[in-house]
Image (tube, helix red, strand yellow):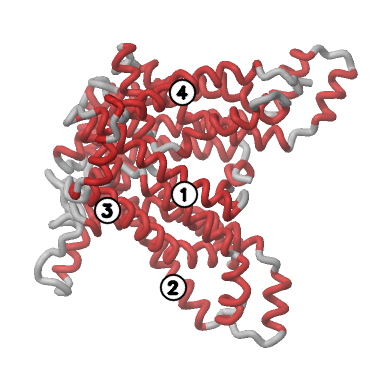
Amino acid sequence: MTRSPGRRLLAATVGVIYFFLMLPLLVVFPISLSSAPYLQFPPPGLSWQWYERYLDDPQWIDATWRSITVGCGTAALALLLGVPLAFSLVRGRFRGRALVDRLALAPMIVPTIILSVSVYGIFAKLKLIGTWYGLVLAHTVLALPFVVLVLSAGLRDFDRALEQAAEGLGASRWRTLARVTLPLLRPSLVSAGLLAFISSFDELVVALFLAGTNMTLPKKMFDNILMEIDPTIAAVSVIQILLVSIVLVLIGRFGRGLRDSAR
Amino acid sequence: MFSSSRPWPALPAFLLLLVFFLFPVARMLAFSLEGGTLDWYAKALGEGLYLRVMWNTFEIALLVTACCLLLGYPVGFLMATTTPFWATLGFIFVLLPLWTSVLVRTYAWMVLLGRNGVINRTLMESGLTSDPIPMLHNFSGVLIGMVHVLLPYMVLPVYGAVRRVDPSVVAAAAGLGASTGRIFWRVYLPLTLNGIFAGSVLVFVLSLGFFITPALLGGGRVMMIAVLIEQQVREALNWPFAAALSAVLLAATLVVYAVAQRLGGQEARS
């Protein structure tokens, strides 16, 4: 397209919208490095005090570890259950397949607040409130749709001739799976697992109900924000952004592109 | 190989969804009919206070969708029709916030929009206003925060739709002497309606059930249905009423999806 005046106006408008999108990130970084004793912007000077405060507070560190534990547990369980599920949904021909397909994607459609409140009711009966494995179970329900979507896309593009070749050369069913199918699906598996991790690591609403007094990082942040807007949150935010960025870089490097999976 | 016609590999996941998703939600919704009456629904949809929450939620969802369309369409359009370099940069600007936790972004908006926040300080120091403009703990705060969170969900479908427009059609229109504006209104807009539709449905449905942003930026003064459900369960311990509210929210969500699928075929899911 030529650089018409209309086009320039469009570019300028979009520039402003990009600024709007980036504004929160542009604010969080300087505040986290502020030397002021309270929230002040722009910061009068730079210091690491808010990061030190985060690192010195066992509550924050506990919450961070708990979130990482729950995230890893969710990724593991979501893959363990989601990979066979995706295989049946893409390759299986059984009655009720369409129904299972809908059920597997439903947690993405049903508002999270409804899921949280419902599971809270059950967990209160089962005494699962405040346990890390309870949170893993609930987060796995939310992560399953991601695993199914990413894996299904990978399986649909899969060249079945490679499996037939392995079989023709005398490999058993399980050997073919372990030596041909899963290695070829590795990019999809990596993406699915890391997405499941992020979805749990960032999740607040379910944790708000189910975590009890055992804080996850988002729940601890939420409680702190409700009480006071202290710059420690900005430091925690930056750390969270960095952790998620590392995971995304890993997906970009070893996983199947997110844009490919969206097809 | 592994084209088993038996459903057993799906069984463990199916059981998890049954026990920790389908059953709890069904059990919860059943509370709303406790005592065999529809009284709780009458309360949710009949009492002025709660009716206003429903209406508020609907109004905010509609406004958020409109704002996202207004802001998201130009972004998606430009990204799809610009050079690869600018498109990649655009993707970074759109995806970076998307991958930042909603909580972090909501916190940042609190810092920005507060009475002594960054925006008010800037406005007052530059002499544009003498008194701080109230932007936090009110309708506009919730709107700004929600539009920011949901904008990428509009940009991406619009981007996809504009990319799918056949360039030869645009070239033909230009060759026949159509102006840039005319090309947009007569070629791009009709051909990208599916993207607009998909993005709008997604943003609208996500808005209906939104919790974090209204809870923090609304400061208790802007009540949306998800916040009301949380209060009923955690503070009022009124399960039957929370269940009736959940049923209404779920029904609204499913109706929008069903209508969207009927109208837009597969579009709404992509």
Dot 1 amino acid type: Val
The disc label shown at residue A74, or none: 4
Residue drawn at the location 48% of the way across and 67% of the way down: B74
What secondary structure is found at the residue carrying circle 2? helix
Q: Answer few, some or many: residues within 10 Å of disc 3's Cα (few below 14, many 20 plus, some between 14 and 19).
A: some
- A227 in relation to B24, above or below: below
Dot 2 amino acid type: Ala
Residue drawn at the location 66% of the way across and 37% of the way down: A153
B130, A103: nearer the viewer: A103
The answer to whether the residues at label 2 and label 4 have Cβ atoms under 8 Å apart is no
Residue A99 x %, y %? 60, 30
Residue A148 x %, y %? 59, 31
Q: In whole angstroms, how far apart are the C-alphas of marks 3 and 2?
A: 33 Å
Camera-side mark, 1 or 4: 1
Which residue in the protein does label 3 denote? B56
The answer to whether the residues at label 3 and label 4 have Cβ atoms under 8 Å apart is no
The disc label shown at residue A12, or none: 2
- Pinpoint the chain carrying mark 1: B
- Pinpoint the chain carrying mark 4: A
Residue A26 seen anywhere in this rendered image of the structure: no
Residue drawn at the location 49% of the way across and 23% of the way down: B17
Residue B237 found in image quarter: top left
B201, B166: nearer the viewer: B201
The disc label shown at residue B256, or none: 1
Q: Answer few, some or many: residues within 10 Å of disc 1's Cα (few below 14, many 20 plus, some between 14 and 19).
A: some
Residue A221 found in image quarter: top left
Residue B66 x %, y %? 40, 62
The answer to whether the residues at label 2 and label 1 have Cβ atoms under 8 Å apart is no
Q: In whole angstroms, how far apart are the C-alphas of marks 1 and 4?
A: 30 Å
